[in-house]
Amino acid sequence: MAKTEGPRGSRAEERDEVVRLTDLVFRGSADAVPSMQDHFPLLLGPGNLENMRVILEDGQVVSHLGIKENEIWVHGARIKVASIGSVCTHPEHQGKGYATILLEDGFEHIRRRGGDLVLISGARGLYRRADCHPAGRYYQVAVGPEDLKGKCVPEVTLRVAEKNDVTALTTCYRREPVRFRRPVEDFAVFLAALQRRRPGLELILCDGEMVGYLAHSVHKGKAEPWQGRVIEYAGSRAAVLAALGSLMEREELESVEFMVPAHDTETRMMLGVTGDVRPLPHHTLKVLDFARMMKGLAPYIEDCLGTSVSFDAVNGTFRFQSGSGTHEVRGHSDLLQFLFGEVERPSPWSDVFPLDLPEPGLNYV
């Protein structure tokens, strides 16, 4: 009978084995190049061992769930979050419930460490059964050269980001009203990882001044049309659109695809984005500690409403209390829609919600 160990954090000597497992499951080979560590350097890096949750059989890592703790800033309000990704089990050990065990352990691990909201890069049954649901408001946009004709955009140039640009990149990102907490050290790691694989990170320059940046990938198959994908953008929206035009011309792309958060009104207006607003594809969320999260958001909400508020949760019912009364939301799915989705809300809560969420961008796990 196999000896099982875990769930627990990884040990330093096990990290290479964890990376090889994720490469085998997600990249098709344990020796994939670029590896999953190249794609997710913070999640699978040596500084995140305790958050690389594993189960072992007879000393071999057979299942893994990765956690990256962070904060998101929403117009000055802070939410402590944890992103979950690279969840996998070795093909020879699937069907034993290890992923479910790791997910339950991961939630408890995050809760103990103060995380209130979980962002999951996945929407399969494993997460739905754990009461994780899609939420958020985004537009999926495809822009071609014709879409930029007649737009009032500046003359810009693109320059590949270098190591000494990290501080400027970090400063530019920090000006975004809805974003992840991203210290300069994290940006340095992202830049080094992008330099090892195809996606590029380029500064957008106007008259020699940096006015934004563009992280992107370009897919050039054997046959045209070729397409690009924006991983993340920041800075002047007019300059970003001009940069997309330059990128398409340089790389001979038919179009560039990217996600535009609903709160990015300027980009939406400049491109004439219409259609249905939707949750981020293939992502789910879960609120782990409603009362604690809302206590942290209370000052922001009170500023918006001009009155005191309080929140509590009992047996799956979530209560929003203000001077005008109490509103109840039942169930995690409806809670996520009330907080972050496109649903009707009673007054005064319609003046506060939905809360905006950032597009994962370089923080995707």
Image: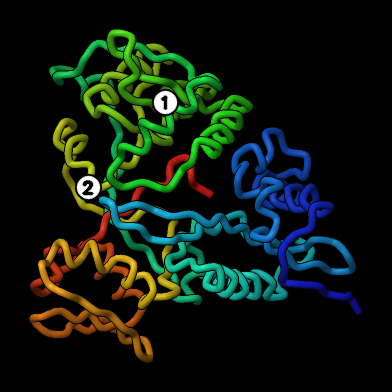
Which residue is at the front of the view, 35 or 162? 162
Up/down of 208 relative to 190, above or below:
above
Q: Nearer the viewer, mark 2 or mark 1?
A: 1
Q: Element at badge 1?
A: helix
Where in the figure is residue 270, as x and y percent of width and height? 16, 31
Which residue is at the front of the view, 314 or 279? 314
Which residue is at the front of the view, 300 or 59? 300
Residue at (55%, 37%) from the top-left corner?
185
Name the residue carrying label 1. Answer: 168
Residue at (44%, 21%) from the top-left corner?
202
Judge from the rendering whether residue 237 lies leftward or rightward of residue 234; answer left or right: left
Residues packed near mark 1 inside 10 Å, few (<14), some (14 to 19) or many (20 plus): some
Say which quarter of the image contains residue 237. top left
Up/down of 148 relative to 178, above or below:
above
Where in the figure is residue 362, as x and y percent of width and height? 48, 40
Name the residue carrying label 2. Answer: 263
Residue 122 visible in image: no
User: The residue under label 1 is which amino acid type?
Assistant: Ala
Say which quarter of the image contains residue 32. top right
Q: Element at badge 2?
A: loop
Where in the figure is residue 43, as x and y percent of width and height? 61, 49
Judge from the rendering whether residue 132 lies leftward or rightward of residue 110; answer left or right: left
Judge from the rendering whether residue 336 lies leftward or rightward of residue 352; answer left or right: right
Up/down of 49 relative to 359, above or below:
below
Judge from the rendering whether residue 151 lies leftward or rightward of residue 184; answer left or right: left
Say which quarter of the image contains residue 351. bottom left
User: The residue under label 2 is which amino acid type?
Assistant: His
